[in-house]
Image (cartoon, helix red, strand yellow):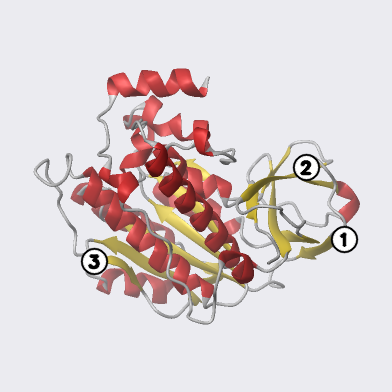
Amino acid sequence: MRTAIRILACGLLPFASLALAQNMHSPTLPKATTTPAAQAGREMHLDVDVDAKDGTPVTGLAQSDFTVLDNNAAPDGLTFKAVGPGQGKLEVIIVMDAVNSTFQTVSYEQQQLEKYLKKPGLKLPNPTSLAYVTDKGAEIQKGFTQDAGQLELALEKISTGLRFITRNTGYWGNDERYSTSFKALDQMISYCSGLPGRKVLIWVSPGWPLMSGVRTELDGTQENEVFKQIVAESTYMRYARVTMDDVNPRGLNSSLLSDYYYQEFTKGVSKLSDVYLGDLGLQVLAVQSGGKVVEADNDISRSVAQLMDTTSSWYEFNFPMPTAEKPNVFHSTVVKVDKPDTKTYTRVGYYDQPSK
């Protein structure tokens, strides 16, 4: 099914340049860190969100309500913690994308965020900040607040520095937009790695060019470079304890194929023959981090409000990572809840490394 949909997309949408596969890079982390294995440690940590049918967080669950699987087997040494409202350390960054959205779309996003922040009596559920993605990368508003009015003032003062990419830039500008977007993502991950506790990025964006259903034929060297980037992004987001949500501002006015094509890439990549550029799309990385993808249907304010509210409580699991015999061994992680009309969100997997 994945192959069939990819071929269909090739006939409808433009091809990305092979330069994308030739310019992969890894996030910059604090100088004290060394290899991904050392950075992430030998313990697997899962932040698990459980939502009811109406999208509200489900509280009061016990460990016995969950089934946790690592490569379809129950991990040894599993520990559990329920984090209630106000009990955990969590910070939220709302990211406005001025690279992959039009000027009109970003203006509308700002208006919608102002609408949310002006809600009478609103107190933000967690300390929150703002960031913009521009041609300079990520411009992050330093400091966090739960005061909606203070965040609204910060929103009004920020200069977006919007960029316009024409078809004369790269292949319809896709190469440059991709590089700029990943530079910003790397900056966000690096920034988050220096913050304690859990971090949630609410990225308001239709996604960078790779999420348009693009299929590029890769040779062996390029597949290897893309795979290394996939492993790096997954490992560093896990190390920084980042969950990423995506609010797609295109809503029902956009292509159904392009909006949902990302679902073909969310399960994780275990071997080179399964590598595609679509594995690095914004929505793919969001789902793999344990986050949510929301089609805003022009109501960005409501979508952001719902995502903010669902961060008030969650569950944490830890277990020792098994020792891999070779580098970059993919493990799928699954968390199930024995409660009707609930849905769980957590990291879909991790890449294990040899202990030495």
Q: Is residue 96 visible?
A: yes
Q: Earlier in the sequence, mark 2 or mark 1?
A: 1
Q: The residue under label 1 is which amino acid type?
A: Gly
Give the labeled residue for mark 2. 336
- Residue most extreme to the right: 64
Q: Is residue 111 visible?
A: no
Give the labeled residue for mark 1. 77
For label 2, count other residues whose C-alpha is less than 10 Å away and answer few (under 14), some (14-19) or many (20+).
some
Secondary structure at badge 2 equals: strand
Residue visible at 50% across and 57% down in the picture: 232
Left or right relative to 273: residue 312? right
Give the labeled residue for mark 3. 136
Discs 3/1, front:
1
Dividing the picture into quarters, in which one does residue 40 lie? bottom right
Between 72 and 58, the one nearer to me in the picture: 72
Left or right relative to 192: residue 102? left
Q: The residue under label 2 is which amino acid type?
A: Lys
Q: The residue under label 3 is which amino acid type?
A: Lys
Residue visible at 91% across and 51% down in the picture: 64
Quarter the C terminus occupies: bottom right
For label 1, count other residues whose C-alpha is less than 10 Å away and answer few (under 14), some (14-19) or many (20+).
few
Left or right relative to 343: residue 133? left
Give how far across and how far down residue 102 sits, in percent: 22, 47
Q: CA distance from mark 2 to mark 1?
A: 18 Å
